[in-house]
Amino acid sequence: MKKFFLFIAFLSSLLNGFSVTAQNKKRDKECSAFTINTSNSTIKFEVLSNKESFHPEEALTYYWYSTNKILETKGGYDGKLLHGQYSCFYMNNNLKEKGKFKKGLKDGEWITWFESGKIMEIITWKGGIRSGKYKSFDETGRPVLEAEYKKGMLNGKMTTYLRGEVSDVKIYRNDKEVPPKVKKEKRKEKGNESNKKIDPNSKKKTLKERWNKLFKKDKKDQKDKPVTSPTKPVKEKKKFFNRFHKNKNKENDSKTTTNTGKN
């Protein structure tokens, strides 16, 4: 059984090898490799061997090769379209730019570097249109900007950095900034807070004031009321009875005087 499995593994490796060589041969027939030396860089790239016959889109920028130069034209081309790997180097052999072309259009992830070797920016393309994540960095390697694109337009979160720290975050939709959503309750709270400056100890003060006011009222009421002793009503009763008896005595005296006068 082991020999059988080993034989199957050997056959699969052979088939994979044949498929890779077939793809490479097809690619060799399809593409041709070139190198261009300029005053400040060296460029290695691939182009389509056969001239493509298709109608280019007006809004897209095509990269093509002619007379030992790489040219770029919007909405058209007149040479061999770049197709496959693209690499550009500084004079110190550090990478300057690297990416991939597909029938003259940038496709996939493209990276550019500073001459020091640190990444400058990362751009994602899809058929010659920015689509996906974008990142840029300063010469020290700290992030400067992060954004998301869809069909060439800002679509999603855009974060800006200052000295490597987040300074601003915005949301975009179809290249337009989306204002942040604020709930009605939060707006009311913010309005009340802005109109009224609330003292953190105000609640304690109001409770104390209420408490003091209640006691002050009770004290005032007690002061205003006449002070009565428990013996006072008894005295009043005595006075009343004394007056009553005095009046009766007066009446009796008057009666006696009238009676004596008659006699």
Image (cartoon, helix red, strand yellow):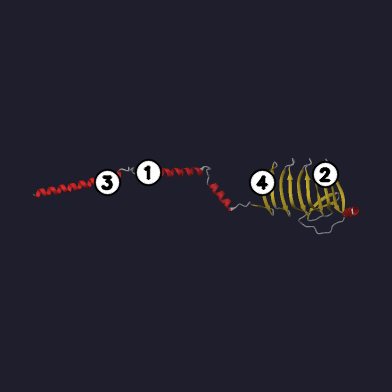
Q: How far is disc 2 from disc 1 in space, using C-alphas?
A: 100 Å
Q: Earlier in the sequence, mark 4 or mark 2?
A: 2
Q: Earlier in the sequence, mark 2 or mark 1?
A: 2
Q: Residues within 10 Å of mark 2 (few under 14, many from 20)?
A: some
State yes or no: discs 3 and 1 in contact (Cβ < 8 Å). Answer: no
Disc 3 marks which residue? Answer: 237
Q: Is residue 21 visible?
A: no
Q: Amino acid at mark 1?
A: Gln
What's the residue at 69%, 47% (across, down)? 159
Farthest-out residue, left: 263
State yes or no: discs 1 and 4 in contact (Cβ < 8 Å). Answer: no
Q: Earlier in the sequence, mark 3 or mark 4?
A: 4
Nearest the viewer among 16 and 227 is 227
Nearest the viewer among 31 and 215 is 215
Disc 4 marks which residue? Answer: 168
What's the residue at 86%, 47% (across, down)? 35
Q: Amino acid at mark 4?
A: Asp
SS at mark 4 in the image: strand
What's the residue at 74%, 50% (across, down)? 133
Give me the disc on residue 222: 1
Q: Residues within 10 Å of mark 3 (few under 14, many from 20)?
A: few
Q: Earlier in the sequence, mark 2 or mark 3?
A: 2
Q: Is residue 124 visible?
A: yes
Q: Nearer the viewer, mark 4 or mark 2?
A: 4
